[in-house]
Amino acid sequence: MLISVDLFPTILPDTVVAIESLGEPSHVALFPGEALIVRRAVEKRKREFAIARTCAHRAVMKLGFPPSPILRGSNGQPRWPRGVVGSITHCEDYFAAAAARFEDMTAIGIDAEIHRVSHNATMVGL
């Protein structure tokens, strides 16, 4: 299920579009160049990559840019289309991407992690 993010608007500026998926959206597709990036990966990694890229594609299109591949840079970072900055994250069955026009933001960084409370944890106040 692909849905608009409800959490990110509270922490990101209005100029940022964020898309998230809880589980697998109904339509997941990679551009040929993106598929090459994960061609040797295990199926789980291919699925994660495709869902996260689908979120990124939809965020970019919501900004008004045409559909285009988001390839990998020399350090493994997503190479966003010209004029776009963004970030992609995923953990377990949660996937998200945030994107903005470069004229509005010079960089974006998001991260998602599973929050589990250990029954043996000690709370420390700082």
Image: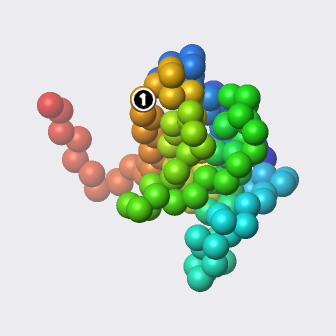
Q: Pick out the residue farthest to the top.
A: 14
111 is higher (above) or lower (below) than 15: below
Which element type, helix, strand or loop, lies under badge 1? loop
> Residue 120: image x %, image y %?
28, 56
**In which quadrant of the rendered image does the C terminus lie?**
top left
Q: Quadrant of residue 30?
A: bottom right
> Residue 43: image x %, image y %?
66, 77
> Residue 107: image x %, image y %?
42, 33
Q: Is residue 63 left or right of residue 8?
A: right
Identified at 57% across, 17% down, the residue is 14
99 is higher (above) or lower (below) than 40: above
Identified at 85% across, 53% down, the residue is 26
- Residue linked to disc 1: 106
Q: Pick out the residue farthest to the front.
A: 82
Looking at the image, which is closer to me, 18 or 57? 57
What amino acid does circle 1 point to?
Thr
> Residue 101: image x %, image y %?
56, 27
Q: Is residue 60 left or right of residue 120?
A: right
Identified at 56% across, 33% down, the residue is 83
Kindly tell me whether residue 8 is visible in this rendering: no
Kindly tell me whether residue 57 is visible in this rendering: yes
Q: Quadrant of residue 3?
A: top right
| Badge count | 1
